[in-house]
Each structure stands twice: as structure tokens, then as C-alpha cells.
Image (cartoon, rainbow, N blue to C red):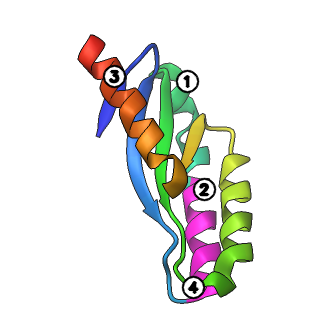
Amino acid sequence: LAYHNKTNHLIKPLSFDLADELSIQNKAAITFCHLNDLVDYAKSHKASFDFLIAKPQNKDFKGDYENALDYISNTKAPNKLITEDKWEEYTQNTFDFLAAN
């Protein structure tokens, strides 16, 4: 899913509702590496990666989840991490932009 607003926003769901802490850490590392591989693509295509983030249901994984988000946000590729509490606002803003254009 994607839309263009001066930047090509490439939207992808990213769930961290996983079975254990190691799976959360691995998913964050893989996502970070993929984003770093896409830095040149993002620059040449004026792209940004917007991730719709789902948190783990297991409260014991909160620290690993927060560390994963911090880690991913430090990639050189332009990205936006939209957590569940921001989905409605992000969706409304996107809809408003698309409806106006």
C-alpha cells in the first residue's frame, strides 16, 4: 500500500505480537537491515517507509518491544513508526489527504 504526498509513503504492517523476546529482537534486526539496504532506493525515489506497528499482547515483552522500536527508528532510511494508539490519527490524516487530492 502506498500514497504520494511530496514523498512516496510505502505503508507496511509490522507486528511484534510474537512468541518470545528473541523473536522480537530478530524481527527488529531483520527490519533494520532491510531498511538500511533500501536507503539508496528511498533517496532516489523520495520514499519513506511507514510501519503500522502492532505491539505484543504479552506485557512481559514490553521492554524488548520498546527496544525494537528504538532500534528500527535509528536506521538511515526515512521511516515512521505508527503504533496502535496512533493508527486512527494516521488513517484519518491519510484519508483526508487522499480525499483532497
Q: Which mark is first along the chain, 2 or 1?
A: 2
Residue 98 sits in quarter? top left
Instruction: Read off the residue under disc 3.
Output: 96
Q: Are marks 4 and 1 in contact (CB under 8 Å)?
A: no
Q: Quadrant of residue 70?
A: bottom right
- Which quadrant of the view contains residue 99? top left
Tell me the element at label 3.
helix
Q: Which element is circle 4 on?
A: loop
Residue bearing mark 2: 33
Three-letter code, disc 4: Asn
- Figure quadrant of the N terminus: top left
Residue 22 x, y percent position in the rendering: 64, 84
User: At x 41% / y 17%, what residue is drawn?
Assistant: 5
Q: Mark 1: few, some, or many residues within 10 Å (few <14, many ≥20)?
A: few
Per the model, the C-alpha gap separating discs 3 and 2 is: 33 Å
Please say if the residues under marks 1 and 2 sit with CB atoms less than 8 Å apart: no
| Residue type beneath disc 1 | Lys
Q: From the image, state whether disc 4 or disc 1 is nearer to you.
A: 4
State the separation of the CA atoms marked 3 and 4: 34 Å
Looking at numbered disc 3 in the image, what kind of residue is underneath it? Asp
Query: Measured from the top left, where is residue 58 in percent x and y?
Result: 57, 85
Instruction: Tell me the residue at 39%/42% (across/down).
Output: 11
Q: What residue does disc 1 label? A: 43
Q: Secondary structure at mark 1?
A: helix
Numbered range of the magenta stretch:
20-33
